[in-house]
Image (cartoon, rainbow, N blue to C red):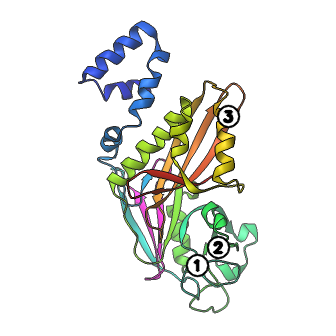
Amino acid sequence: MKLIIFIAFFTSSLFANELLNTYRTNGISSIEKQFDLELTKEIFWDNLLKDKDTRFGYTESYNSFLICDKNSSTLAIYKQDENNTFVKEREYNAFTGKINGDKQKEGDLKTPIGVYHINNRLSKDTKLDPFYGPLAFVTSYPNLYDRMRGKNGSGIWVHGLPINQERDDFTKGCIAIDNQSIECLDRNIDIKKTALIIYPNKPKTTSKEELSKILSQLYDWRYAWLYNDIEKYLSYYSDDFTRFDGMGIKAFKKYKTRVFNKIEKKTIIFSNINIIAYPAADNTYQVTFNEYYKSRTFEFNGDKTLLVRLNDSNKLKIFIEK
């Protein structure tokens, strides 16, 4: 079905006729490379993004966003409607950390700024302390970007208010809303399909042009990987690149050169792609997706995270990878 849809995109062009004729005479393997190349072109992504709501980025696996504006002390839910537009359904007054700024370490009383998912839902059934109200959602702080920048701490939740006691008008770093609101939030989100973005002030929007450039170059990086173009592949890595395990750019280049020298046929499939502009970081984006990779000597199927920048020439540069 996906193949038919992809071919249909080109049905009015000479390309479609040539492609179908090649497929007719030589089979599917003969046109795979051309398909892979088409995915590297901005025009494909321009058309795909044309009618999408991309205010918060590009998403294939989220149907809700929780948007926390620390400056206005609010937490809002945006959900996709039947037209795949993100509509603000609720906005709650929220308490955040006592101290302004981005969280850096355990006990600094700051609420982090960043992009997070929700790892868990806690309630009285899981022996949640009544201080946190009837419900709490455990966030993924510190995420990969946080850890690579030396941030620490844990226990950043979205939770309710104490059931049997008073509390201050701030938190130690969590986001707190009243108990009626936390129960409303619980009814309105699927935590597996919800991203939390915490901004220092109003949300910043992402243009379709930026997303098209990122997506086309993400697939150009994949194309170089698939077809063993080590020079092009490495051109997508920043000089300050660090892999999640601490490997720097020099060691990474040597490692990847050894891998590419095997000249193996590969299968590389990206799915559930999400691209979100990182708050308070110019031209910086968190890219997450599921990666299926298979070669003669190695197979992987799991989550991938890239932190990327668009430089002054609009070239994608990966500076963190896991």
Q: Secondary structure at mark 1?
A: loop
The circle drawn on residue 156 is: 2
The earlier-in-sequence mark between 3 and 2 is 2
Rendered position, 5 above or below 176: above
Q: Amino acid at mark 3?
A: Val
For label 1, the residue is 111
Magenta segment includes 75? yes
The earlier-in-sequence mark between 3 and 1 is 1
Query: Considering the image in quadrants, where does the N terminus appear?
Result: top left
Is there CB contact under 8 Å for labels 1 and 2? yes
The earlier-in-sequence mark between 1 and 2 is 1
For label 3, the residue is 259
Q: Nearer the viewer, mark 3 or mark 1?
A: 3
Of residues 222 and 172, the one nearer the viewer is 222
Q: Amino acid at mark 2?
A: Ile
Q: Where is residue 41 drawn, in percent x and y?
A: 36, 37
Is there CB contact under 8 Å for labels 3 and 1? no
Magenta residues (range): 59-80
Prevailing SS of the magenta stretch: strand
Q: Amino acid at mark 1?
A: Thr
